[in-house]
Image (cartoon, rainbow, N blue to C red):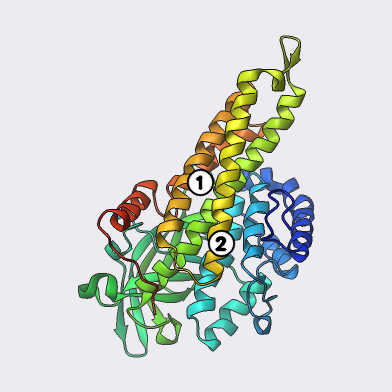
Amino acid sequence: MNSRSGISYFTDEHDLFRQTFRDFLEKEVKPHIDEWEKAGELPRSIYKKFGEMGFFGMTHEEKYGGSAGDMWYNVIFDEELARMNSGGFSASIGAHPMLAMTHLNHEGTEEQKQRYLVPGIKGEKVGCLAITERFGGSDVQAIRTTAVKDGDDYILNGSKTFITNGVLSDFLIIVAKTAPELKAKGISLFIVDRESDGLSATALDKLGWRASDTGEIAMDNVRVPASNLLGHENHGFFYIMQHFVSERLAMANGGVATSAYAMEVTLKYMNEREAFGRKINKFQVLRHHIAQMASEIEMNRQFCYSLYDRYQNGDYLVKEASMAKLVCTQMADRVVTQCLQMFGGYGFMEEYPMARMFRDTRLGQIGGGTSEILCEIISKIMIDKEGYQAPN
């Protein structure tokens, strides 16, 4: 039972996991966040600690080292990461299991799973998913990276950008065109080892998410064995579309969790800060702002939970996941901005939590599909009656 909402999506086992994970984060992560923000990357040791605790394998099969849990463990994972107030930490530690390993789990062969998924669950190898390019992000079929068959290998040429874990990961899931003339139907996925000849990466300097390793990747005649083709050739676009739903649900839920945490720290500050002889939580205008935000947060939390429940039962939620990411990330922007305002001048200071949260939250409406792209997807479904079917 989720004590916050009264809705029985969570069992006692889920609640126990939440407390265990929260305790772990408070001890092993929170004291180091400022250090990692300055470094612009996470140490490999934290991935290994996550792996040792089983946090990367919660929903994977036991034969690969996982716990075979349901997706509510991932929901809790996202919500608790948000409490660390570091979008970069959440992105880097989350991109490994929820992007790279998701594709390995669903599309990988047994041999690929043994080579990458098993050590990935242990935190011994870290992965990334490389889709975005300078000319193709949300428009996946516009990518220009190519993979040409050459005997028992493929030769990859092209570049990627804005890739979380793009510099320090051990392996990359690279999206490339194997049949450019087929456009979306000619895209494939490849597992590329970091030490591959012709592969290079450059770290990017960002406004927010500063604790995450975000990179630009270049491929100059990178030779990849055909055995590293992930799934079927020319099926990559459909794999990506399938997993976009889970990614957008995660970002929507992350927006709710960030909003809730912003409210938590703001309420604490309001109970401590005094102005004109009384605590600022006694001023009606501020109280009403809190009431409005709390109502919106709870409404969107229940929307996200209902979608996760449907998704776990097999519904293909392109429209609904797009709606959730659209409204929840927009809400997070509004809530964090309003909460910063309640801190007054201190909200603008780096020693207080809102400055970093303000920077980090902004990416919610850009990554994983911009708000404009999501509106277009929803418009196509609602107005043009375009149907999106689950890949076979």
From the image, tell me which residue sits under label 1. 328
Q: Residues within 10 Å of mark 1 (few under 14, many from 20)?
A: many
Residue bearing mark 2:
308
Q: How many marks?
A: 2
Classify residue 320 by image quadrant: bottom left
Q: Quadrant of residue 271?
A: top right
Residue that protrudes farthest toward the top in the picture: 276
Q: Compare marks 2 and 1 and give the one earlier in the sequence.
A: 2
Q: Quadrant of the N terminus?
A: bottom right
Q: Amino acid at mark 1?
A: Cys
The secondary structure type at the circle numbered 2 is: helix
- Residue 126 in the image: x percent, y percent? 59, 68
Residue 323, image x and y in percent?
A: 43, 52
Residue 374 shows up from this direction: yes
Depicted 7 relative to depicted 283: above or below: below
Dividing the image into 4 quarters, which one contains the C terminus? bottom left
Image: 302 above or below 361: below
Q: Kindly identify the residue that appears in the image at 71 percent across and 9 percent down.
A: 276
Camera-nearest label, 2 or 1? 2
The amino acid at mark 2 is: Tyr
